[in-house]
Amino acid sequence: MDMKDSSPASARRTFFTQASAGVALLALAPGVRLVDLALARVQDEPASATQRWGLLVDVDRCVSGCDACVSACDTEHGLDGNERPQTDAQWIRKVDLVDNNTEHQLSLPVMCQHCEEPPCVDVCPTGASFRRADGIVLVDKHTCIGCRYCMMACPYKARSFIHEDLTGQKTHAPRGKGTVESCTLCVHRVDRGESPACVEACTDAGHEALVFGDINDRNDPLATQLAETTTRELRADLKLNTAVRYRGL
Amino acid sequence: MKIAYFQSVSSSRGYWLISAIAGVVTLAGLLGAHHMENAGHWVTGMSNQVVWGVPHVFAIFLIVAASGALNTASIASVFGRDDYKPLARLSALLAIALLSGGLAVLVLDLGRPDRLIVAMTHYNFKSIFAWNIFLYIGFMFIVGIYLWMMFEPRMNRFSARVGTAAFIWRLVLTTGTGSIFGFLVAREAFDSAVMAPLFVVMSLSFGTALTLLIGMLIFWINGAAIDPALAQKLRRLLGFFVIGVAYLVAVDHLTRLYVTGHHQLERFILVDGGIYTLLFWGVQILLGTVVPAILLLLPRFCQRGYLITAALLVVVGALAQVYVLIIGGQVFPLELFPGYSVTSTFYDGVIAHYTPSLAELALGMGGMGLAVLVTLIGVRILPFVPVQMAGENQD
Amino acid sequence: MIWSGLFEHWSKRRSCAIRTGVITVGLVAGMALSGAYAQVSQPVFPSARGEQCVEPVDVMRRDHFEFLKHQRDKTVHEGIRTPRHSLAGCIDCHADKDAQGRFVPVNAKGQFCQSCHVYAAVKIDCFSCHAARPSERVSQSP
């Protein structure tokens, strides 16, 4: 899949304005999924700081009791668990809220917020926690020594420590005992031009409570929505400038 | 000038008995660590809620105590108090031994202790943990040099200068250890500038208590006793350190009590936190602060038995304090949504449970065992222990 | 330039010679001591799919871990997922199938990675995290 003639920025834009780009590309690629072709970054080009991937969670659209995003994440990354809820990994979780004064009820997913100033990256002694150029916060499990300082530092409880030996890992989601992990924003999918599994699942379930895109791209539907409506960061007091924003909270 | 003569501890039944006990405890720690690494951390009480457990309690206690153990040497060479000199060498050895014990526990509790080399070759200089690696290694190095200056007569004249460097280093080191917690902005229980000075004063108290206890043990093995005059000085000193810790603990809690947003956390620790409340009031405050303060500061309790009791209580209170600080601070949930009641599958909004397993308790205790073992090996091969205490006539 | 090049060449040759010498001496000593000369056999593993490897065989034998490490850093930190030097790429060609047509992990006994690493006495822990079978089949494997 050679895309050398289109810059990553324009490739990205095409994805988010599929309707217009689709007409041109349909003729080019019969039988190939439009999304795959339209969004893929040139394979040997590094992630770039011109982009910043983000998520918008529309709390009003998120349905209490629905955990399509959570199951999709578990399936995508092979987070089977061992029936030990205290130690099993959870990259994304549904949180149910009740307003203490009004008893108004809300439901929303919480995952790694992909901060611009991530405390986990600050505290990591080996630099295994890092922020990729395009804003995705990841753990390089090759250099993670399992000290769990990042878990102490994360304000969102977004990280899990792998407490036991694993088998049957997915090729695109290597994970193993003794290291820390968290939501990767489905970096393997983003790198081939797809949106994260949770977002896809939410859309497939008909809720469309999750919007994925490039915060830096003014033409991106995510950036447009962020510009048009009031959204909130979790723990905004910490001024971490998260890439995950919540609307209706 | 009073001169102290030193000797190495000779072989005796007491020596081998204590060595054997320390060895067994250390071995049990290694077995515990092996089990944890082999099976994974799910066999401990630790979880995704409580990520640092009892091994960290012991490790932090030992590391904090290590820098404090150097006190006696510092008083002798930095502040020129010759009457502390007889214990100077031993206190420096203890500093190294306690640090070794603490670091061993810390490393063996890692998810991937086999990657220790990665921690030595990859540094993130914004991480306080990474600074601490340097601070610990540097501390060992400086104290090593310091010991050399004290041992080698031709180098004695430099011992004050190296001692000063070691003293400054140890203050920075404890500040660094305190900042591991103090800079955790996400967690209410830790995020406080008081952490660094609190850790410094804790180190003075824990270190002095351990110097007294292990010092007395070594002297007992060697068939001697600590000079009563020196013991009395250390006794008063420990008393003041205990009061100092209590003062900073009070400041820490009062600050949080003043801020409305922190009331729930304070209520948890001080009123209805179950085991944590019990440990705080019963062990840390009553047994670890009030009782030893009375025993250490009132003249009528000047006998050796009271001193040993007080020092032991300080150590027990210290462990309780670190436990309440580290574990209590983690079991209290993070507040992501102020004003809302929260439920989830990932223990949001609930007090987490933590019960240490045998393996992790063994690992923690193993660090203590290793510290004693290192001390015993040290005093056996080099002249650390004074023949007669300074102040007595020996010429 | 010429001199430094020559020197580099010479020192490389020399270190190589020393290394070979040490290894030879070690091997000879080992053989003499154990008398197990005849029992040490070359590793045997299933042949790979495809025409040829991404690099010449002798280069891969010597430097495959360098390629893998380089690629691993590029993938994890920069998102460059070219298959040429990737572990997944190796596995796709080198994983064998059993009698039922299912893929066998490359780190199973007698398989590509395991057989050579046992022979060379080099322990790897790639597969405590990474899948040892080609990607599409992972979910179907028992």
Image (cartoon, rainbow, N blue to C red):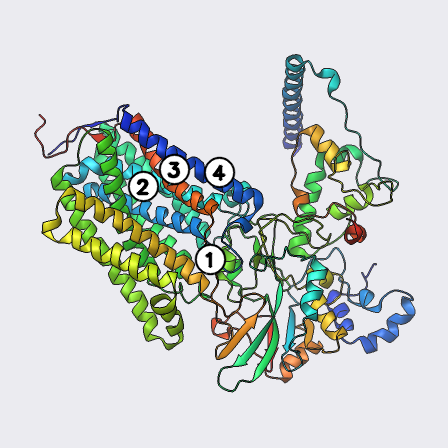
Q: Residues within 10 Å of mark 4 (few under 14, many from 20)?
A: some
Can you give x and y, in whole percent of width and height, for residue B87 in the image? 21, 37
> Do callouts 4 and 1 point to residues on the same chain?
yes
Instruction: Say what amino acid the circle numbered 1 marks.
Output: Tyr
> Do callouts 2 and 1 point to residues on the same chain?
yes
Q: Which residue is mark 3?
A: B370
Q: Which residue is mark 4?
A: B31
> Do callouts 3 and 1 point to residues on the same chain?
yes
Instruction: Say what amino acid the circle numbered 4 marks.
Output: Leu
Q: Is residue A178 above or below residue A60?
A: above
Q: Which mark is residue B354?
A: 1
What chain letter is assigned to the residue under label 3? B
Instruction: Name which of mark 3 and mark 2 comes first in the sequence.
Output: 2
Q: Give me the residue at 7% from left, 29% from top.
A: B393
Mark 3 to mark 2 CA distance (whole Å): 13 Å
Can you give x and y, in whole percent of width and height, for residue B111 in the image? 54, 48
Instruction: Name which of mark 2 and mark 1 comes first in the sequence.
Output: 2
In the image, taking residue C59 as reference, residue A231 lies left or right, namely left
Helix, strand or loop at disc 3?
A: helix
> Do callouts 3 and 2 point to residues on the same chain?
yes
Report how many numbered discs are placed on residues in the image.
4
